[in-house]
Amino acid sequence: MKNSLSHKKPLYFSLGFIILILSSNFLVQKIELTGHVSTPIVWGTIIDIMVIIPAVIFLFILRRKPTISIFAPMMILGLFIVHWLVPPYAKESLVYLNYSVIGMEVVLVGVELTILFLFLKSFPKWKRSFKEARLHYPFVLGRMFEANRITFASYKYSAQFQRLSGFLATDVSAIRYALFPHLDRSPPKDCTFSYHKNSEYFGIFLMLIHVMVIEIIAVHVLLMQYSHTAAWIATGLDAYALLFLIGDYQAIRKAPVHVGRQSLYLQKGLRFHISIPFEIIEQIRPCIHSAKECSSDKAALNMTLAGFEPSQPQYVLELAQPLEANLYFGLKRKICRVYITVDEPHAFIKELDKHGVVLNMKN
C-alpha cells in the first residue's frame, strides 16, 4: 500500500504543478491580474505552456524520453492554448512562434514526402516483402511493419526510417480498418480465436464514440468564438482520433489471435502486434495475478480487453527469451510474457498443444 502511494506522489505533484501553471497564466493573460500584458509576459507563457508542461509530463507522468509522435501533438495543443490565453492586443509577440510552427510543419511534410519518394522507388521490393510476410504476419498491420523493416534495412538511417514508416503504417492501417474492413480476408477459423465477443469492450467503444462526437461539436463551437482556423484544425484532429478509434475496434474484430504453422501471432487492435515462434514459448499457464498487476507489468503485453471494470486475463504465456514487440506508431518494447484472454480458451489450448506448447497447471 505504501509503495503504491509513493509511486502516485510524483503523479499528484505533477498534476498539481501543471494546474498551478495553467491557472497562473490564465489569471495573468485572461484576467490581466498584473495589468497590461507585455511581450516578456507573453514569452513567459509560451515557455510555461510549450516547454515546462511537456517536460513535466515526460519526466514525471509518462516517465520516458520525449518522442516526436507524442511531443509534436503536445506542441500543437500548446500553441492553441497560448493563442487562447494571450489577449488580442498582445498577439504580435506570437508572430515568430507561428512562423516557427509553420517551419516545423514544412520540415515534417518534407520528411513525409522523402519517405513517400523512397517508398515509391522501392515499391516492387516492398510489395514482394509484403506478400512474403503473410507466413508470420497474417494481417495487414503486421505485414506492413515487416515489409517496411525489410525494405528500409539497407538505408543509412534505417532505424529512423523504420520509426517514421511505422508511424505511417499505423495511420494507413487505421484508415483501412475503419473505412475498408471488407478488404481483409479472414484466416481459417480453426486456427483463429476471437477475444472481444465475451468482453464488455463493445459497450466501452460505443460510449467513447458518443463522447467523442459530442466533444468534437463542443470544441468546434467553443474555438469558433476565437479562431476559425484553430476550430477547423482541432476538428480535423478530433476526426482523425475518431477514425483511429473506429479502426482500432475493427482491427480487434478482423485480426483475432492466430495460431500459425510456425508462430503465434497476436495483434490487439492497432495498439501492438507480435509474432512469437513456438520454439521460444516456454509454457502457458492459468493467470493468478490481478488485473491491476497485469496492466502494470512493464515486461508484458496484455491481450485482455478492458471492460467497465478491470478484467483478469485467463492465461500467461511465458517466453524462454525476451522478444521485441511492435507498438503503435512505430514504437517497440522488449517483453518476456503475454497475458491472454480468448473467447474459446479450451480450443485455443488444444490448438497450441498441437505445436508443442505446454500447459502448466501448477502456479
Image: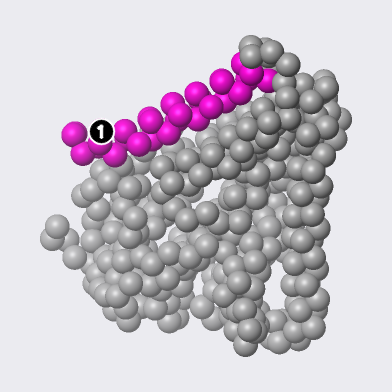
Location of mark 1 (residue): 5
Image: 196 above or below 20: below
Magenta span includes 255: no
Residue 349 visible at all: no
What's under tag 1, amino acid-wise? Leu
Q: What's the residue at 42%, 77% (across, down)? A: 263
Q: What's the residue at 23%, 56% (across, down)? A: 286
Magenta segment, principal secondary structure? helix
> Quadrant where the N terminus lies?
top left
Image: 302 above or below 192: above
Query: According to the image, what is the colour scheme of the structure?
Result: one colour
Q: Secondary structure at mark 1?
A: helix
Image: 226 above or below 325: above
| Residue 211 image-quadrant placement | top right
> Quadrant where the C terminus lies?
bottom left
Q: Nearer the viewer, residue 40 or 185?
A: 40
Magenta span includes 7: yes
Which residues fall within the magenta stretch?
Answer: 1-29
Q: Position of residue 207 (x, y in %)?
A: 58, 31
Q: Position of residue 198 (x, y in %)?
A: 44, 44
Q: What's the residue at 62%, 87% (across, down)? A: 154
Q: What's the residue at 48%, 47% (across, down)? A: 58
Report the side of 272 relative to 310 (left or right).
right
Disc 1 residue crowd, few under 14, some 14–19, many 20+, Cα 10 Å: few
Residue 48 visible at all: yes
Q: How many marks?
A: 1
Q: Nearer the viewer, residue 50 or 294?
A: 50
Q: Position of residue 262 (x, y in %)?
A: 43, 81
